[in-house]
Image (cartoon, grey):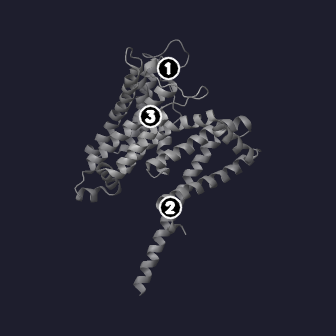
Amino acid sequence: MLNKYSPVSKDLLSFAIAILIALALGALVIMATGSNPLEAYSAALKSALGSNYRVLNTLCNTTVLIMTGLGCSVAFNAGIQNIGAEGQLYLGAFAAAIVGLAEGIPPVIHVILVLATAAGVGMLWALIPGVLRTRRGTDEVVVTLMMNYIAILLCSYFVNYPFRNRAVTWPETEMIQASAQLSHLHPLSRFNGTFFIALVCVAVIAFINRKTTVGYEWKMVGLNPRASAVAGIMPKHSMLTAMLVSGALAGLGGGMEVVGVRHRFMDAFSPGYGMTGILIALVAKNNPIGVALVAFVFALAKTGAAGMEMATNVPAELSEILLTLIVFVLCAQRSLRAAIGNTRSQHGQGRQAEQ
């Protein structure tokens, strides 16, 4: 039945089915706590989409997830696994906060300089595992995962000691200059212009993937490095380029968080944006537009969870269960679809052999 649909339609349908199954299973968990699932889900939707400023807050929370998901998708698409988006995010945010403290720079130029620095630092941090992978064959999964801890602890040291704002109790830097800030566009929301920057990044990566030689090479290398080499593509160069772009996007996400949302660097500011970006990229199958849509769904669940907890006895951690169930159902669907396809192929070959 699904054969009459396009691949994009199939993916959207699979995602919708996964959400419905996750909601149904989540309802069972909610009933186990003695609460009404309809009331809980209603409270979550009201908290995330119940008014203009709540919608804007959800979009604001979507922004950083778009950037980490987009960064991971670029690397995954080229066959190199960047699990270090969290560390690149942290370093980009910290670098943005330091450059944002500089005085005497015109507003627009200052914002551009801050974001460019954040992207550059993220790119440099991604360069290390990229070079180790392409030159030495080192497993980039292990390297990027370990480098996350180095980046997070390094930023934590800097913000706790040499760059700490002594006027506050929580470890954080001083507020960046007004010339480096993007103003909030609603008095009750932190929504700001970085959301539109994220959408521009989505459009740029989508264009690169579909219309440029670089995007074609990323895809071919991701599908089969050996075959792409025979076709004249340099797999190592493509992998390294994709890793650098991936790190730049994650670092830029950290800079956007500082410039538009917090206006300073705060210790432990990320609840796992980088790791969530990995899931978003996998669910979206590395499609940039899909990344934006999935990031919105993830932000919707996380934003609505707080309101659900306040209105009912359901803990906010249920949102993590729902997101995990969505990923689990999608993985099960893809595995089942592949198994059915292999079975049909073997069955067809058996018929041909009999004839």
Q: Position of residue 234 (x, y in %)?
A: 24, 51
C-alpha distance separating marks 3 and 2: 32 Å
Residue under circle 3? 253
Q: Position of residue 86 (x, y in %)?
A: 45, 36
C-alpha distance separating marks 1 and 3: 18 Å
What amino acid is labelled 2 in the image?
Answer: Ser
Quadrant location of residue 351?
A: bottom left
Task: Judge whether 310 appears above or below 215 on screen.
Answer: above
What amino acid is labelled 1 in the image?
Answer: Glu
Task: Judge whether 176 appears above or below 30 on screen.
Answer: above
What amino acid is labelled 3 in the image?
Answer: Gly
Q: Depth-wise, is mark 3 or mark 2 nearer the camera?
A: 3
Residue under circle 2? 335
Q: Position of residue 3 (x, y in %)?
A: 50, 68
| Secondary-structure class at tag 2 | helix
Residue under circle 1? 172
Quadrant location of residue 51?
A: top right
Q: Residue visible at 28% across and 40% down?
A: 131
Closer to the N terminus: mark 1 or mark 3? 1
The crowd level at tag 3 (other Cα within 10 Å; few <14, some 14-19, many 20+) is many
Q: Depth-wise, is mark 1 or mark 3 nearer the camera?
A: 3
| Secondary-structure class at tag 3 | helix
Q: Which of the pair 354/202 is nearer the observer?
A: 202
Circles 3, 2 touching at the beta carbon (< 8 Å): no
Judged left or right of residue 242, residue 293 is: right
* One can see residue 81 in this view: no
Q: Which of the pair 233/213 is nearer the observer?
A: 213
Judged left or right of residue 96, residue 296 is: right
